[in-house]
Structures are given as C-alpha cells and as structure tokens.
Amino acid sequence: DAKTTQPNSMESNEEEPVHLPCNHSTISGTDYIHWYRQLPSQGPEYVIHGLTSNVNNRMASLAIAEDRKSSTLILHRATLRDAAVYYCILDSGSARQLTFGSGTQLTVLP
Amino acid sequence: DVKVTQSSRYLVKRTGEKVFLECVQDMDHENMFWYRQDPGLGLRLIYFSYDVKMKEKGDIPEGYSVSREKKERFSLILESASTNQTSMYLCASSLMTSASSYEQYFGPGTRLTVT
C-alpha cells in the first residue's frame, strides 16, 4: 500500500494560515488523497479529499502537486478549535478501508 | 448532518466476559466499519460491512466478531475479552457510491478497559 509521510507536529498562531504538508511519493494514479482530523477525545472527522485538482470546501483547501507526490492542507485562518491531529491518507477507492498513520499534531497558539 | 452513535463512551469489563459494542448511523449508509485506536499504532481496521448480513475481515479480526442484521446498526462482539483488547473503539460509516472515493463518518468512540 502506498504510504504517506507527515511531520509529527506543527505550531501555528491563531488567525494565521496553516499549511500542513504530506508526502506520498509512491501514490498510484487512482489513489485519492484524503485528510481527516481528530480533536481530543473525539473520533476522526473528514476534512477534504481530492484526486488531481486543488479542492476547496468550508473547512479547508487541498493543494495537490502536479506530480501528485505531495499535497498540502491549508487552513486559511487557524482557530484554537483547529488544534487536532491531522491525518493524510491515500484511498484506492476499494471501499474497504482507510489506513491512518500517526498524523501531524497541530498546536494553535493564542 | 450524518450522525454515528456508539452505545457507550466508557466501558469496563472483566477478562473472559463477552462484550457487545453497538453502533448506529442515521444516514442510510451502506458501509460500516469498526476500528481500534491505540497510542503509537494509529487506527486499525477490525471488520467492515458493505451490506446487511455482509462482513469482511480487516487487518486485526482475531478475537472479534461482528453482526449487521439491520442497515443502520453494526455490532462488534468480543467473544472473551482479554486485557490486550483494552483500547479505544471507533465505528464509522460511509456511502457506497458510484464515485471512486468517499468520506467516512466516525462516532465518538468507546473507551474499553478490560481488567
């Protein structure tokens, strides 16, 4: 299975943009890139996903490199409530499972 | 909004007991999943189901079974609980769509302690 690599932790100041990187150099042509986040004491929450083009939704933006070997989750204005573990996941569309790695712990400083 | 509920947030059971964890979703999703989450190991898939009475093993099915008698309900059963099954258990559901990918909606989790 294709794997993803993320930094263990990142810090951001409140109300500033945050760029969370993810490397997936072995991604296949049919793999979708998903992002989830997990707030303390809660189940993971879907954030966004994409295949080739950049994607925007109410929570975040996803920027996908042209070669698809990396992607960046962008939170446009971090709030204290965005402090969470962010997971970058590849999905082959098998409808079988998502494989969660260790993710990036985002700390938002007031 | 999709809602996935789990029967308990916290559960304490004794070794050897049979344990039932219940999960209900209210959005008519075809797919349902059971994961466990442990520090340093991330989320690992135990079982999933893509239809009523259908199930498939995930990565770590040993010591567990599942039941899906109704579309909205997916139960995880620990036949004889052991201390190494102490963990956070997470249920999720998703649509089975014609698209190649989909998002999963997770419940709040059940923290099970086996003593």
Image: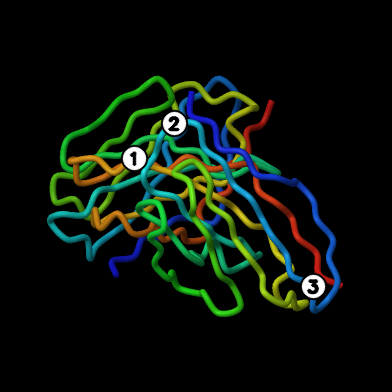
Q: Are marks 2 and 1 in contact (CB under 8 Å)?
A: yes
Residue B69 image point, x, y percent: 49, 52
Give the quadrant of residue B53: bottom left
Q: Residues within 10 Å of mark 1 (few under 14, many from 20)?
A: some
Q: Which mark is residue A95?
A: none
Which structural element holds mark 2? loop
User: Mark 3 to mark 2: distance in Å?
Assistant: 32 Å
Q: Residues within 10 Å of mark 2 (few under 14, many from 20)?
A: some
For marks 3 and 2 on the same chain, the one whose residue lies earlier in the sequence: 3
Q: Chain of mark 1?
A: B
Q: Nearer the viewer, residue B85 or A6?
A: B85
Which structural element holds mark 3? loop
Give the quadrant of residue A108: top right
Q: Nearer the viewer, residue A76 or B77?
A: B77
Identify which amino acid the numbered label 2 is placed on: Met
* Residue beneath disc 2: B27
Give the quadrant of residue A39: top right
Q: Share a chain, discs 3 and 1?
A: yes
Residue A41 image point, x, y percent: 70, 44
Q: Chain of mark 3?
A: B
Q: Residues within 10 Å of mark 3 (few under 14, many from 20)?
A: few
User: Mark 3 to mark 1: distance in Å?
Assistant: 34 Å
* Residue beneath disc 1: B95
Check the image and report above or below for B27 versus B11. above
Which structural element holds mark 1? loop
- Residue B45 left/right relative to B107: left
* Residue beneath disc 3: B17
| In front: label 3 or label 1 | 3
Identify which amino acid the numbered label 3 is placed on: Glu
Check the image and report above or below for A64 versus B77. above
Residue appearing at x 51%, y 75% in the figure = B60
